[in-house]
């Protein structure tokens, strides 16, 4: 049990380090656009908006599971634990890595301010191609729409893959990340 916990902690630290390094690096290789996309989804276990949008997150991740796009769930703050992230992953059936950002270095580097908030990074160009909402299921905190009509995360990836310019960033709705 003790060694499992230590192994999990080191795995999360290593994954966080890899992400920090990949955010800061720029590659000059001429890759297909989808080869260089990382999707960072900022989440919090206790945020009702985060819990609600996991259905859409799972749908988008499944849609692009055969592509080289990488999805990461980032949990900013010291209150998130390995156990709580594992429980969140299991409860909401997430199929990508959930990583601690206890010192908020990833959150600060990508200027994330709300959970849930998505930031899509083109690693090879070292640029953010989309920032904001996952979908429009919430008009404001506590004000859930009966029908979600816009799928911003899916649309941003699809638009980028079709080599169109993404001009719309959105303002995320959810729980504020405290610094």
Image (cartoon, helix red, strand yellow):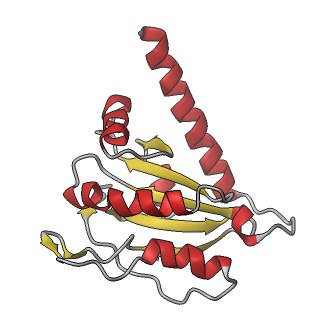
Q: Quadrant of residue 159?
A: bottom right
| Residue 45 to residue 141: above or below | above
Is 142 positioned to the left or the right of 172 in the image? left
If the image is split into quadrants, where does the C terminus sit?
A: bottom left
Q: Where is residue 162 shown, x and y percent of the image?
A: 67, 82
Q: Where is residue 173 shown, x and y percent of the image?
A: 27, 72
| Residue 169 to residue 70: above or below | below
Residue at 37% from the left image edge and 34% from the top image edge: 86
Residue at 54% from the left image edge and 90% from the top image edge: 167
Residue at 70% from the left image edge and 67% from the top image edge: 34
How many labels, in total? 0
Is 105 positioned to the left or the right of 161 in the image? left
If the image is split into quadrants, where does the N terminus sit?
A: top left
The reply to whether residue 112 is in sight is no
Q: Quadrant of residue 42?
A: bottom left
The reply to whether residue 127 is in sight is yes
Which one is in front, 53 or 166? 53
| Residue 1 to residue 54: above or below | above
Q: Where is residue 148 shown, x and y percent of the image?
A: 28, 77
Is 48 positioned to the left or the right of 85 in the image? left
Residue at 33% from the left image edge and 39% from the top image edge: 78
């Amino acid at each position: 049990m003790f060694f499992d916990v230590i192994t999990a902690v080191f795995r999360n630290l290593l994954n966080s380090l890899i992400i920090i390094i990949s955010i800061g690096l720029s590659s000059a290789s001429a890759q297909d656009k989808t080869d260089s996309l990382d999707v960072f989804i900022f989440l919090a276990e206790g945020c009702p908006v985060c819990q609600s949008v996991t259905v859409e997150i799972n749908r988008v991740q499944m849609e692009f599971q055969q592509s080289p796009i990488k999805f990461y769930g980032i949990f900013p703050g010291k209150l998130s634990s390995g156990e709580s992230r594992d429980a969140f992953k299991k409860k909401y059936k997430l199929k990508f890595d959930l990583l601690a950002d206890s010192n908020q270095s990833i959150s600060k580097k990508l200027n994330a301010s709300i959970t849930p908030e998505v930031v899509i990074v083109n690693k090879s160009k070292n640029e953010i191609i989309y920032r904001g909402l996952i979908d429009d299921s919430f008009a404001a905190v506590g004000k859930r729409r009966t029908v979600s009509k816009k799928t911003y995360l899916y649309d941003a990836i699809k638009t980028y893959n079709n080599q169109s310019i993404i001009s719309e960033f959105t303002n995320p709705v959810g729980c504020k990340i405290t610094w």
